[in-house]
Amino acid sequence: MNIAQFLQRFRRAWLAIIAVFAIAAVAVTLLDQGVIDWLNPPCAERPDYDAGVDPKVASKLNFLFDNRLLYCAAPSIPFRGLRGPIYWGSDGMSALLFFQGDDLTGVGVQTYLYNDTFVVGPAGESPPEGYGELRIGRSALRNQAPGDHPTYFYRQDGAPLRSDAIANIEIVGPAIPRTPAPVGGRDVWRDFGRIWSLVRRTSTTKTDAGTAHATVAISFATDRWQNRVRRIPAEGFAGDGGAPDLIRLRDARLAGTLPNDPFVFQTASGALGHSLWVANVVTTTHPALALVRPGTTNAGAAAPFGTTGGGDAAAQPLLVANNVSLWHSSAILVPLAIAVFDPLPFPAGVPVEARYWADDARRAAQSPPDRTWTVTFP
């Protein structure tokens, strides 16, 4: 091979390398322009609600749909009575699961995972990366719709992490009666559909003893809601971008500068609710958190808002968290409690008193709180 041939081959190889980089650049541009949306399409149509669906539930689902945050999928072979697809969506502060049927008595969620590993957490904001839930009295994945014979299934659970991409949901219900195939006959297209669903990992259904295990895998894009969650970190624990920094929490623990008592690590607001994170909490009991309505005096003996007492809401000054979950990390070394509230009945930025009980039994007995703080929600 002479020098001219070598240079010609080198030139061709170099042009090929440049072409590969150019194609890669175009691919990245396309991703920025909507391929990710194309790969994770939201529901094309608003749910067709039954008359018995709680208007508050329908309002939350409608918000997700209007903001392209509601996804849906149908099992390849549904359980008996299922009407319509399985709906799932999140605003970053919580996740909603919804489907409808003729009679959902006895129908339940057996498996509810983000990706293939992580069990969906309790209602509220997604947990910090690297934290695991300490489950104290965690309830089963039961239907939150009222009534003994509900016609819809609804749950509000924890939001996914930013690294999650798929919600894997297995629903157990009665199997659809099937007509046996004739002797020597086969339903080729049904078998093909099952194999194709298995390859795509989108839906499989197993039937045994009259029970159907209908499974859907719903892909989603977390970038769609990341900017919708607003946060206020505790002083000294904000990162360079202003977001709460868990590494600073760990470094304070290692340096011995972390407060000895529980303290508010951050407050956060989303479309479907609010959360308050308390760091350095006791993990051997189930804590409780409540907010005192602005302008309320002598709220210690009042009934928790929205639970008992009736009458004017102003006469029920305590807003008790819907759920408080405990989280711990062997890397960060500081346990967290995440309290979840419904959308608050006062504007953002209004200072409110937050009350913390290390044990919810003490709050139920109307004992004084162990800690109180003045907080604001963004």
Image: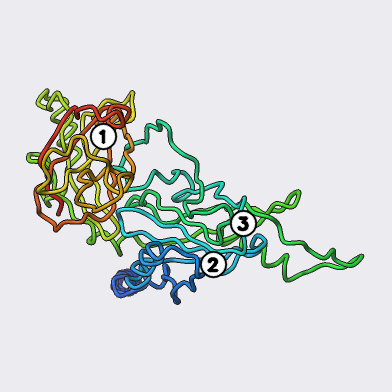
Mark 3–mark 1 distance (CA, rounded to whole Å): 35 Å
Counting residues from the N terminus, which is met first, the one under dot 2 or under dot 1?
A: 2
Residue at left 68%, top 55%?
174
How many neighbours does mark 3 have within 10 angstroms: few (below 14), some (14-19), or many (20 or more)?
Answer: many
Quarter of the image where the C terminus is located:
bottom left
Circles 3 and 1: CB atoms closer than 8 Å:
no
According to the picture, the residue beneath numbered tag 3 turns out to be: 214
**Which class describes the residues within 10 Å of circle 2: few (<14), some (14-19), or many (20+)?**
some
Three-letter amino acid code of the residue under disc 1: Leu
Dot 2: what SS? strand
Between 292 and 265, the residue placed more toward the observer is 292
Q: Do the residues labelled 2 and 1 touch (CB within 8 Å)?
A: no
Left or right for 144, reference 319: right
Q: Residue at x 34, y 53 (%)?
A: 94
Q: Quadrant of the N terminus?
A: bottom left
- Residue type marked 2: Pro
Left or right of 132 on screen, residue 315: left
Identify the disc placed on residue 336.
1
- Residue type beneath disc 3: Ala
Which mark is first along the chain, 1 or 3? 3
